[in-house]
Image: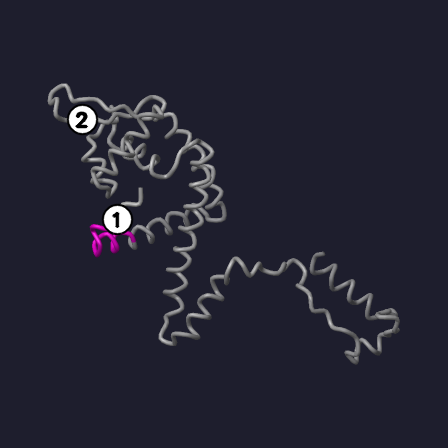
Amino acid sequence: MGWNAWVEEEARRKTSKLKFDAKEYTAKDFEANEFMPYSGPMPDQPPRDPDHGPTLDEQIAIYQREYGELDPQVEKIVNALSRLDRRMSVAYGRQLATLGLNHAEWEVLKELVMAGRPYRLGPGALAKRLGLTPAAMTHRIDRMATAGLVTRERDESNRVRVIVELTDEGREKWLQVMRMASVFEEDLLQDLSGEERVTLGELLTRLLRRVEDAQPDAGGRLSDLD
């Protein structure tokens, strides 16, 4: 029921006789508040599932209550970014799963594409870019080679050196992921104008640069999760 319809319905109820638990209530009773008041959710405002936790504003209010020195503007920005990152990660993970990929495999595909044609890197370079140990990188490459996403061959100019190369199937997987992600990202930003998108991009880039300058080693994993 929309807001206007709800108001009209309550007006109708005020001017007519109501029956509740076999007792009649008139407009006079209504004005005297002698009937049971409405205690359900307001129209177009469904109750929030408590299992989903507090809203962003509720969270900030709780933080302010427990920590009086909190800057609500800073906290709202930081927590909005955190919540957005979490939900985007979940959405991307679901997209990858529909293509038979996981995030670890996507990271390798991305780094090989970023290296440029012919999409080759050594296992050591990949491990460094992804913040992995050599053993974890080898395990990941083994899985992807079995799946046909990459090949692993000896370097013809240096037989000691191994080269990991993206296959045609691996590049096609990368393209499929990018196509799906583009649809999701356009939908995410649909409420922002072109100017707002430019401004937001510039602001987020400034924040990113500050974090990168302060924590230059935070790009990869600090511990192996594979």
| Figure check: 10 above or below 160 | below
**Residue at the farthest bottom position:** 32
> Position of 31 compared to 201: left or right?
right
Q: How many angstroms separate mark 1 from mark 2 (CA)?
A: 24 Å
Identify which amino acid the numbered label 2 is placed on: Val
Q: Name the residue under label 2.
A: 162
* Location of the N terminus (image quadrant): bottom right
User: Is residue 220 shown in magenta?
Assistant: no
Front residue of 40 and 116: 40
Quarter of image, res 226: top left
| Figure check: 120 above or below 199 | above
> Position of 136 compared to 15: left or right?
left
Q: Could you say whether the residue bearing mark 1 is in a helix, strand or loop? A: loop
Q: Position of residue 118 (x, y in %)?
A: 24, 23
Q: Mark 1 points at which residue?
A: 223
| Figure check: 174 above or below 59 | above
Q: Residue at x 29, y 30 (%)?
A: 113
Q: Which residue is drawn at 85% across and 70% down?
A: 21
Q: Which residue is drawn at 24% across and 52% down?
A: 212
Magenta region's main secondary structure? helix
Q: Position of residue 32 (x, y in %)?
A: 79, 80
Label 1 Cα crowd, 10 Å radius (few <14 / some 14-19 / many 20+): few
Q: Which mark is residue 52?
A: none
Q: What sort of colour scheme is used for the picture?
A: one colour
Which residue range is magenta in the image? Answer: 208-218
> Position of 112 compared to 183: left or right?
left
Identify which amino acid the numbered label 1 is placed on: Ser
Front residue of 23 and 189: 23
Front residue of 59 and 74: 59
